[in-house]
Image (cartoon, rainbow, N blue to C red):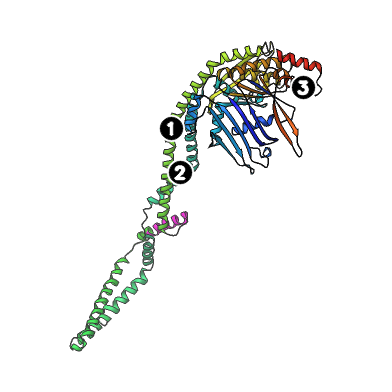
Amino acid sequence: MLKSLYIKNYALIDEISLSFNKDFTVISGDTGSGKSILLNSIALLFGKRLDKNYVNNKKCIIEAVFEINQSLKAFFSKYNLDFASETIIRREITINGTSRIFINDTPVTLIKIKELSKYLIEIHSQNESLLIKQEHEQINILDRLANNHVLLQKYQNEFVIYNNILKERNEINLKSDISTLELDFLQFQLKELKDSHLNKDEKELIEKRLLILSNSEEISKIISSSSEYLTSENGIINNLNKIYRDFLKFENFNHLSDRLNSNIIDLNDISDEVLSYRNNLDANPKEINELSSRLNILNNLFLKHRVKSIDELFLIIKKLEEKIALFSNLSQNINDLNLKIDKQLKIISKLSEDITISRKKVCKKFEEDIEETLKSLSIPHAKFNIHIDKSENYNFTGNDNIQFYFSANKGKNAKNLSSVASGGEVSRLMLAIKFLLSKEFSNKTLIFDEIDTGVSGDIASYMGDLMKKISFTSQLLSITHLPQIASKSDFHIKVFKRTLENSTVTSAVYLEGNDRVVEIAKLLSGKSISNAAILNAKELLNQ
């Protein structure tokens, strides 16, 4: 229950302090007097996005005291907050627009304060009558009636896991940008390279061999002439041997004879090696063709892969192997994720079915209660039905398509709420829903911002009676322009503007006695208050 509200330096409000009790309180005032500012301040306190146009060039403070029960201890324990039966919630907004929120003097995040607001307060703004025509709000209403909070939370936790797995698979699919045809081509390239049985220096060796074979005649002449120069009777080696033998005759030539002998040995080796080349010249056309063919294969591979060496081809082999392996791993990962998705889909499918069953259980009674409540709001022939159909796709609330069907007129079939019902009829339907919800959930503070839009006369009086009944189980604050509703309240707050020396400010007062009679008379007749309006106001207050 909201016990008090303090506002300082917010919009037209310099400073206002209001106290509340558990009964029915109405707030009235001229258009533009600042009633919505009060409502906005409460919404801002519970995490609504800050509109800097409402903040003055002074520090803004909004503070509320709530009386809470022991059932909220779990929330306070969850976030390590001090629990108090009278809990203080405060939001401070600096001149530059930054803000901080506190629960019992402990700073908290917007997420935490928004979570707490679900247990403490519910604000029905003028736009919410339109909101009820939207499917997500209809699902929310049905889940509240079915008390699906725990079951829905369990489903949503599993649904988040399901979505995360889907996201992971999609990311892998984006990384795996190789099609089946591309993979086949990569595998073909790798096979071609590996089947070529590449050797590190073979291109250079082949080119050298072909160079020898293609010049065998000239090389043969060089070998013959070289051998002749080296080993013939008048050749270099024989002549050197003669000199060597002469050196051996005298010891003073010993160092020269050793050097000369070493050269003779080298020349003999050279001669033998030269002669060995003759054996390699015995090539046939088949060998030349084979070597030429192999060189063509290598050159074609160089050209195809745009490289200049076999070492570069080995690098390409490595990259192809890595890419193919990566694709294979990704494919395996995708298969694993598909199995997880199937498993998780079964889990959310079962939980979603449980939610559907829970929703359907409350539909019949809810339909009957709505129709019965609408009778008290002067819609005696109301028809209200809930249609639940299954969708193939899952979302954050399950896989139900839920639609409210409504008819206010006798003999007319109920149609989708999104396409039928006048503003006044929707307002009454919304109030009927709030009334039924308040019977099930009596711990919240309800705030109605002109929920009576589009109604007047006796219907307004009926709505006032229903609001009075709501206040028996829930604290109710209602902003209204209707005297029929204002007269049903236990307390009446008037919001008005005051003109000061250099500014205009919004103020608020509690009305009692004759002041309340005058205010209701003003709601009845406007600025000019007649005696008849005064009498009518007194009559309304005495009903």
- Disc ID at residue 511: none
**As rendered, which of 537 and 439 lies closer to the eye?**
537
Find residue 515 and report its image quarter.
top right
Figure quadrant of residue 521: top right
Magenta span has 190? Answer: no
x and y, in percent, of residue 356 in the image: 52, 20
Residue topped by disc 2: 183
- Residue type, mark 1 in image: Lys
Q: Earlier in the sequence, mark 1 or mark 2?
A: 2
Q: Is residue 49 visible?
A: no
Q: Residue at x 47, y 38 (%)?
A: 168
Q: Nearer the viewer, residue 39 or 315?
A: 39
Q: Residue 510: x and y, percent?
A: 69, 25
Of helix, strand and loop, which one carries label 2?
helix
Task: Report the residue marked by disc 1.
Answer: 340
* Tag 3: amino acid: Lys
Mark 2 is on which residue type? Answer: Leu
**Which structural element holds mark 3?**
helix
**In the rendered image, the vertical position of residue 47 relative to residue 465, given as above or below:** below
Picture quarter with the N terminus:
top right
